[in-house]
Amino acid sequence: MDISRVDLNLLVYLDVLLREKNVTKAANHLGITQPAMSNGLRRLRDLFGDPILVRTSEGMTPTERAVKLQPLVRSILSDIEQAVQEKTPFAAMESQRVFRIMASDYAESCLMPRVLRRIRQEAPHVTLDVLTPSDVSFLDVEQGRLDMAINRFDKIPQSFHQKTLWTEYFACLMNADNPILRQPFTLDSYLEASHIWVSKTGFGVGVGVNPKDVQRLGWVDEALSRMNRKRRISVFTRHYQVAMLLAEQHDLIATLPSRAAWLQKDNPGLVVKVPPFDIPPFELKMAWSPLLQHNSDHQWLRRVIIGVAEEVDTEFAPFGRQFEAPDGYMSSHSER
C-alpha cells in the first residue's frame, strides 16, 4: 500500500469511532455530519478490508481487527499531536487549571493530602477535584475528561500509560485493649475475633456484599479461602477512614493496607500487628490517557504525584519493613 495515498484524517475518524462506537456520536464529536462520518466508516472498511464496527445486540461492536488497531492508531495520533502542537511550559505559579483525579478511598487517605499540600506550594491557584471510582469510567480516562486515575487495577486498557507508585502489604489494626492481645496473635486467635471488611476499588457503582461470596470479598478473604479458613465479618465498609475508626472498638480487627495503618501510628489507643498468614501484596498505580502524555500541565502533575509517592515511601520504609514478605518486594517506578 502506498502510504502517501492514504487520507490520514481517516485515522482520526477511526480513533473517534472506536471510542464512541456510534456513528452519530462520532460525527458530533468531530463536528461533521452523520453522512460524512458514515462515508468515512465506509472508506475505513475499504482501507483495512474489515467491517471495523458491526451491529450486535449490544450496539455497534468493534471487530477483532479494530480492537488490535485501536492502541496503534491512538499512539500514532498522539505522536502527531506532539509534533504539531506548540510546546508551552506549564506556568505553575500563574495557572488556574482544574486537575481532576480519581482516587480510591485508600489512595485518597494515604496520598492525596500530601499531593494537595505540594500542589498548593508550587501552584497556589490550581484547583484539585478528587473523584471516587463510582464517579467515573475508563472511557472518561481514555478521552481525557479525567486527568488521572490512582487505584489498584486488575486490568488497565492497553492504550493507557501507567506507573506503579508503590507496592503495598497488609496490616492488622485493633484496639490496644482488644482481648485478642492477651494471647499470642496466631491464625486461630485471628479467626476467633470479629472483623471489619473494607474495600472499594475499580470503577463503577458499588453494590451490596454477600458475606458468603468469598471470591468477591477481596485479598484477605481469598487468602484465607486458599487455606480453607474463613473469618467472621461483623461490619462492611467502603471507607478506610471509617474502618480505622471502627477498629477503636474493643473487639474488632481491621485488616487493611499497611500505609493506611501507618496513619494511626501515633494513636495510643490502637495497635498494629503483622497478619498471622500470608496475604499477597498489591500495587498502587496511576493511569492516564495517551491524549495527555505530552501535555506540559499533565507532565507537571505526574512529577508532583511521583515525587510525593517517593516521599511517602521513604518515610514509611522503617515502619513498613515488618510487613514485607521474606523475599521482599521492591516498589517499581517504571513508566511506559
Image (cartoon, rainbow, N blue to C red):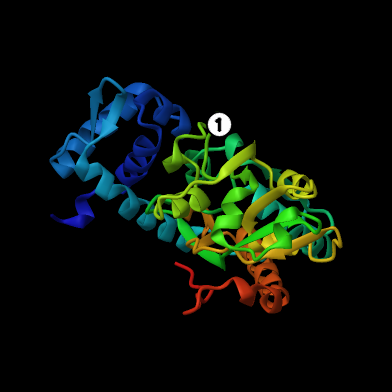
Residue 146 percent across, percent down from the top left: 59, 45
Q: Is residue 26 above or below residue 123?
A: above
The residue furthest front is: 183
Q: Residue at x 13, y 41 (%)?
A: 49
Q: Is residue 253 above or below residue 89?
A: above
Left or right: 25, with 87 as reference point: left
Q: Residue at x 32, y 47 (%)?
A: 70
Q: Residue at x 70, y 45 (%)?
A: 130
Q: Which residue is mark 1?
A: 205
Residue 130 can be seen in this image: yes
Residue 324 percent across, percent down from the top left: 56, 73
Foreground pick, 325 / 199: 325
Q: Is residue 206 above or below residue 280?
A: above
Which secondary structure, mark 1? loop
Residue 301 percent across, percent down from the top left: 66, 61
Foreground pick, 79 / 83: 79
Residue 102 can be seen in this image: no
Q: Quadrant location of the N terminus?
A: bottom left
Q: Is residue 308 above or below residue 84?
A: below
Foreground pick, 236 / 50: 236
Residue type at numbered disc 1: Val
Residue 129 percent across, percent down from the top left: 72, 45
| Location of residue 215 (image quadrant) | top left
